Amino acid sequence: MERLLLLLTLLCGSYAQRQDLTERVFTFPLDKGTPHVKLTANIQKPITAMTLCLRFHTDLTRTQSLFSLATPSHASALTLFKSSVSGYKLHINGDSLAVHGQPDIMDEWNSVCWTWDSSTGLTALWVNGKRSVRQVLQKNGSVDNRVSIILGQEQDAFGRGFQQNQSFIGDMADVHLWDSVIVPCQIRHYMEGNDFVAGNLLNWKDLQYTITGTVYVESSDFDKLSCY
C-alpha cells in the first residue's frame, strides 16, 4: 500500500521542498482540478491560542479557501474562507463565524491576520490594517496538534475531500502561524511589510511544503504591494 501511495504521488507530480520563500509566492493559475499545497507545521501540543497571517492576490468574487487546517476529528479545525467581496468566514473545530465589511482590494495584494485566544474565545480578523469587531468563537476550546494544513483547497476530511468550486485562484505568500495572539504592533509591521517576528509554527522563511497539481513558485511583485 505504501509503495502504491508513493507511486501515485510521483505520477501526480507532487514534490517535497523546504526553503526560504522570501520574495516568492505560490501561484494557483487554474480554475479546474484540485491543485493545492500541503504545509508541514512544527506543532508539538494542542493549539489554545494562535495568529495566522498571509497575503493573497485574486480577482475572484466567489467563495474560496485561503487556509485549511484539519485534524482527525475536525475537518474545519482552523479554516479561513474568503466568502464574498469584503466578507470572510472563520471556522474553529467546526464552529463558524462570519466577518463582513472588511477592506477588499480586487486584483491587488491583500494582507490578512486572524487572531484567537481560547481562554476568552475572542477572535478578530485584520485586513489591510483594519481590525474587525472582536467576537467569541470556541471559548475554552483547543485544536489537536495532529494536523493537515492545505493552501488552495478546503478539506472536507483529514487531508482530502477537496471541492473545485472552493479552490483558490491567484497568488498567495507570507504565510505565518504563531501559537499565541501576537501584539497589534507586530500585526501592523506585518501588514506594512516591515520587519516582524516570524511564526513559530509556520514560517515563510523556512517552509516545508508539498505541491500537488498545477501550482507554481514565482517571484513576488511586493514592490507593488498595497496594504491599504
Image (cartoon, rainbow, N blue to C red):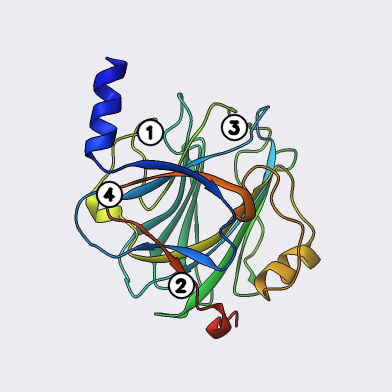
Label 2: state its secondary structure: loop
Q: Which mark is residue 159?
A: 1
Q: Which mark is residue 213?
A: 4
First along the sequence among labels 2 and 1: 2
Type of the residue with mark 4: Gly
Tell me the residue at 65%/28% (across/down).
46
| 3D distance between C-alphas at marks 1 and 4 | 15 Å
First along the sequence among labels 1 and 4: 1
Image coordinates for residue 188, horizontal then vertical, percent:
73, 71
First along the sequence among labels 1 and 3: 3
Camera-near label (4 vs 3) is 4
Label 2 sits on residue? 86
First along the sequence among labels 3 and 2: 2
- Classify the position of the C terminus by image quarter: bottom right
Task: Kindly give the residue lying farthest to the left in the view shown.
Answer: 32
| 3D distance between C-alphas at marks 2 and 1 | 28 Å
Type of the residue with mark 1: Gly
